[in-house]
Image (cartoon, grey):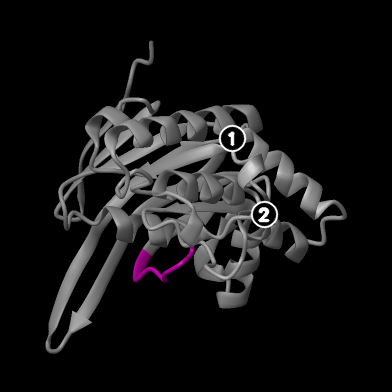
Amino acid sequence: MTKILNVRNLKKTYTSGSKNLTVIDDISFSIEEGDTFAIVGPSGSGKTTLLGLCAGLDEINDGLIELCGEDLSMLNEDQRALLRNEKVGFIFQDFQLLPTLTALENVSVPLELQGAANATKEAMDLLAKVGLAERHNHYPSQLSGGEQQRVALARAFSNKPSILFADEPTGNLDEETGEKVIKLLFDLNAEMGTTLVIVTHDLELAKLNQHILRLKGGKIVINETTILS
C-alpha cells in the first residue's frame, strides 16, 4: 500500500512573550491510502494542531510531513492551498457553511472552482446521498445542526478528495444525530475510497477506525490498530 500521509519527528512550538510552548513534540506515524485513522486525546493534547499541520494549514518548526507524496516544507502557501483544493477534504465541528449560499450552492462552489462541467448536477447527487435533495434551496440558518453537517459532508466529498480530515465532526450534535452523520461519513468514505482522519474525544467513534493514535501533552502515548468486526 502507498503511504498517503507520512509524519516524521514532527515538532510545533509557539512563542508567547518570552516563553516557548511546545504543542507537538517529536511525533512520527504514517497512514496508508484507504485507511481510517482516529486521533484522540484530552483537551489540550495537540489533536487539532496536529491535524492542521498534517493538512498543510500551518507550518511546522521541525520534522517532515509528506501529504499525497508532497513534502509540505518544500511548498509555499499557494502551493499548499492548491494541494488542499485538489486532494484534501475537510469537515469541521462548526460546519463552516457559507451563510449567504443555499445548501446546493455550498456544495457546488468547490466543484465550480475546479471547473467541473456539471457542478450543479454533481452537487445535487451528493445532497441526495446525504438525504437532503429536497432541502437544496434552503440556507444554513434554515437547517438543523445535523442537516448543516450533512451539507458539510457533501461539500467535503465534492472534490473527490484523496484524504479527508474531520475535526470533531459530531462535537455540536446530539448523540442520535451524531450517529447518523458518522454512518453517512463512513458510508461515503467507503464508496469513494477516501482516506479518513478523524480528530475526536469520543472513544466509541475512534474505535470505528482501523487505527487509533492517542496523544497526551503533544506526544504519542499509544499508536494501535483496532480489530473491526
In the picture shown, does residue 220 fall above or below 82?
A: above
* Residue located at (59% from left, 35% from top): 131
Give the magenta part as a residue range.
56-62
Q: Nearer the viewer, residue 62 or 50?
A: 50
Few, some or many C-alpha atoms within 10 Å of disc 1 (few <14, some 14-19, many ≥20)? some
The amino acid on which the numbered mark 2 sits, given as a three-letter code, is Leu
Residue type (three-letter) at the residue carrying disc 1: Gly
Is residue 85 among what the camera can see? yes
Q: How many marks?
A: 2
Q: Nearer the viewer, residue 194 or 27?
A: 194
Q: Residue at x 17, y 58 (%)?
A: 44
Sequence-first tag of 2 and 1: 2
Residue that badge 1 annotates: 131
Distance, label 2 to label 1, CA atoms, is 13 Å
- Element marked by disc 2: helix
- Our reading of the magenta stretch's main secondary structure is loop
Quadrant of the rendered image containing residue 59? bottom left
Q: Which residue is mark 2?
A: 104
